[in-house]
Every structure is written in C-alpha cells, then in structure tokens.
Amino acid sequence: MGHFGTHYENAFESYLQVRSMRYVRLDQARKAVFSGSGIKSFDFIVYPEGGNRHLLVDVKGRKVPFEAYQKGAGMESWVTADDVEGLKGWEEVFGEEYQAVFVFAYWLVRSGDGQEAGEGELGWFEDLFRFRGRDYVFWVVGLGDYALWAKRRSEKWKTVYVPRKRFGQLAWSMQEWSEKKA
C-alpha cells in the first residue's frame, strides 16, 4: 500500500486489499503523465471478480457526523464539473470493458468534537471499514447515472451534485456493487 494520497484514498486501498480485490493505484508519477493529456486523472483501476467490467475509480472523501449518516443525511455527493468530464474522457480512452465510477468515502465521526466514534458505536453498519483508527463507509455510483442526475451546486466553484434522495437510489455500498452491479 502506498504512503501517498489522502487518507480517504489510503483507506479505500486498504479496503480493496482486505477484500482481496485486484486493483492498480495510479500513483502521483502516473498522474503527472496523465496530466499531459489534458484530462483530469482518477485514482484506481479495480478489477472485480466474475468477468465484470473493470472500474475506473475517482475517490471523493467526505467527513460526516455518524449521527447524521445514521439518519440518512450528510451523504454529500458533490464533485467538480472537471471530475465528471475527466472520467468521461477516460471511459472513452479505456473503452467498453471499463466503467467510470465515483467512490464516495465517508469518514464517520462523532458530531461536535470531530473525534472518532467509540468502539462498537458504529457496529450496526454492514460495510463499515476501520482504517488507522478511523471508520469509513464507501458508496459507489456509476458515472453515467451520476451525470444524468447531476445538478449545478456552485457556478463559482464549478461543482455539481446529485440530490440526496436520488443519490440514495443510485449509489450502492462498495460491497453490494462488487457483488451485484459491476
């Protein structure tokens, strides 16, 4: 496992390793090479079992109070317009055997003080993943679905999002996605 990137990317990589999922992480050197293409790069290529399409993964990290997450709130799904266009470009470059996806890595913390939840407090989450003392859940949504339902969030920052209710209908836990969807 690399020692670069965000803690969200590192947690996702550890998640893939623990679940014995084959993948390639695009390290900073490869990203620099890709930057010459004019297309925003992504983070991982994941090779699901069973002959499913390979995934071009762009990890988006969000810090969420676990109380809000428990109530179905706090699942921010915003990305930049460049993120969407970049993944579309890479999906075209790689071809039909590949599907571009966003993986939203939600770091669940106690609200108020920003500290980690206590041991066992989050145990009811089926796909909870603990990495370096932090608790994460990973939700994946295909680029095609995301782009179809995306709405402008900020003109100034050039961000888009999928409304929360629709996002809940489109997104799958990473475990469900790897078993059923990919």
Image (cartoon, rainbow, N blue to C red):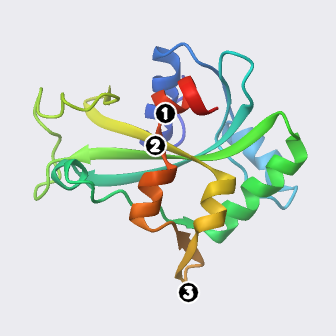
Gap between marks 2 and 1, in whole Å? 5 Å
Most foreground residue, 17 or 177: 177
Mark 1 crowd level (few <14, some 14–19, many ≥20, 10 Å Cα): many
Q: In this view, does 32 lie to the left or right of 57?
A: right
Instruction: Find numbered disc 2 in the image and state the secondary structure of the residue it sits on.
Output: strand
Give the residue number, with chain letter if any, for mark 3: 156
Which three-letter amino acid code belongs to the residue tagged 1?
Met
Give the residue number, with chain letter if any, for mark 2: 139
Residue at position x 84%, y 61% in the image: 38
Q: Quadrant of the N terminus?
A: top right
Mark 2 crowd level (few <14, some 14–19, many ≥20, 10 Å Cα): many
Badge nearest the viewer, 3 or 2: 2
The picture places residue 16, in percent across and down from the top left corner, at: 52, 23
Circle 2/circle 1 CB separation < 8 Å: yes
Most foreground residue, 4 or 81: 81
Which three-letter amino acid code belongs to the residue tagged 2?
Trp
Give the residue number, with chain letter if any, for mark 1: 174
Q: How many marks?
A: 3
Residue 46, image quadrant: top right
Mark 3 crowd level (few <14, some 14–19, many ≥20, 10 Å Cα): few
